[in-house]
Amino acid sequence: MDEDAAPRPSKYTIGQDLSTLSVEELRRTIALLREEIARLEQELRSKDSTKAAADALFRRS
């Protein structure tokens, strides 16, 4: 086995049995999920600001 090989990506699925994952796989999965949460939150902020701008533009006085 090549010890220089990159760690394999986590095969995590929401709701799966966590007892099958090693400590390193759990840590890697947590890091990936945190990155994904940040990405989702950024997209949500972007959509919220776009919606606010559209609401302001089309608001009837």
Image (cartoon, rainbow, N blue to C red):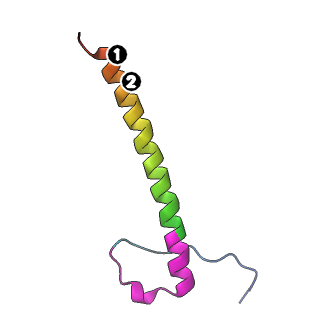
Above-or-below relation of 14 to 61: below
Residue displayed at 68% across by 75% down = 6
Residue displayed at 38% across by 23% down = 53
Identity of the residue furthest to the left in this view: 61
Q: Mark 2, residues whose alpha carbon is within 10 Å: few (<14), some, or many (≥20)?
A: few
In magenta segment, residue 41:
no
Residue nearer the viewer, 13 or 28: 28
Above-or-below relation of 58 to 18: above
Secondary element at tag 2 = helix
Residue wearing tag 1: 57
Q: Which residues are magenta?
A: 15-30
Residue wearing tag 2: 53
Spatial separation of the CA atoms under disc 2 and disc 1: 6 Å
Identity of the residue furthest to the top in this view: 61
Residue displayed at 23% across by 12% down = 60
Q: Looking at the image, how many numbered discs can be counted on the residues?
A: 2
Q: Is there CB contact under 8 Å for labels 2 and 1?
A: yes
Q: Quadrant of residue 31?
A: bottom right
Q: Position of residue 4 (x, y in %)?
A: 76, 81
Which quadrant does the C terminus fall into?
top left
Q: Which mark is residue 27?
A: none
The amino acid on which the numbered mark 1 sits, given as a three-letter code, is: Leu
Residue nearer the viewer, 8 or 41: 41
In the rendered structure, the answer to whether residue 52 lies left or right of residue 59 reads right
The amino acid on which the numbered mark 2 sits, given as a three-letter code, is: Ala
Which quadrant does the N terminus fall into?
bottom right
In magenta segment, residue 25:
yes
